[in-house]
Image (spheres, rainbow, N blue to C red):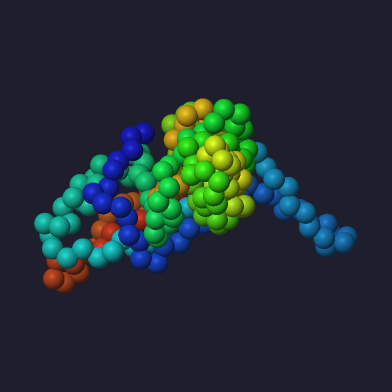
Amino acid sequence: MAIIQPPAPFRLRGAKWRLLSTVQRNRSEWTKRSKGIAQPGADMWTVSGDFVTIVGADRALPWKAFYFALRGSANAFRVRAVEQQQTTAANPTARAGGTAGTTIPLQGLPASSTVLKAGMMMTVTLPSGHERLVGLVAPLVSNGQGQGTATFAPELGEIPAAGAAVEIQWPWALVNQSNEPPGWDVAEGQTYSFRVDAEEAL
């Protein structure tokens, strides 16, 4: 699987982000009470939306070439998960002592500050090469040495190596096109519209 770079960051209209969790819910026939049980396997992001309309055949060519290079769902691409830059702070790296779960120790943060708020996102580079999108469930706060621990969901699934890249400015999801084959619609006046319908490239 190759990672194909789009000609420019996607600007999706009507973007829909979903996090599919691996949970089995059982309900008692007697009490009607239910219980959710987490199952093995990674949670998975999906994203869909229409790409901003492009007017002019020549301007659409780089995007056609991008879609050709995807070869359906064979190759992956990145979609930004935020509408604006979250912070101007430099991107940190992972410290030793991380886990495959829902926390990661970081270094290279601004000293003694709240770097990100709960609800903001990060992308963590994992040893397999996968780039895992996660959402913070608590603020990311640094100490005087520029170190902090991020707490998030979903689980990473792998233990990040010390020094692994972590994106906090413009986090993204690494995805494959799904369901609909990649392509475009053409309307009157050489007006092109492209569709993204993708799932995380686990």
Residue at position x 41%, y 43% from top?
90
The answer to whether residue 202 is seen in the rendering is: no
The answer to whether residue 92 is seen in the rendering is: yes
Residue at position x 16%, y 52% from top?
61
Q: Where is residue 173 in the image (x, y as percent from the top left)?
A: 43, 47
- In the rendered image, the residue lying farthest to the bottom is 188
**Seen in the image, is 52 located left or right of residue 104?**
left
Q: Position of residue 180 (x, y in %)?
A: 37, 54
Residue 174 or 116: which is nearer the viewer? 116
- In the rendered image, the residue lying farthest to the left is 58
- In the rendered image, the residue lying farthest to the right is 30
Residue 193 or 92: which is nearer the viewer? 92
Among the 4 quarters of the image, the one containing residue 81? bottom left
Would you place residue 108 above or below residue 184 in this image?
A: above
Residue 145 or 152: which is nearer the viewer? 145
**What quarter of the picture does the N terminus occupy?**
top left
Q: Position of residue 33 (x, y in %)?
A: 82, 60
**Seen in the image, is 37 located left or right of residue 143?**
right
Q: Position of residue 177 (x, y in %)?
A: 38, 48
Q: How many labels does the image show?
A: 0
Among the 4 quarters of the image, the one containing residue 196? bottom left
**Seen in the image, is 82 located left or right of residue 31?**
left
Residue at position x 25%, y 42% from top?
69
Residue at position x 15%, y 57% from top?
59
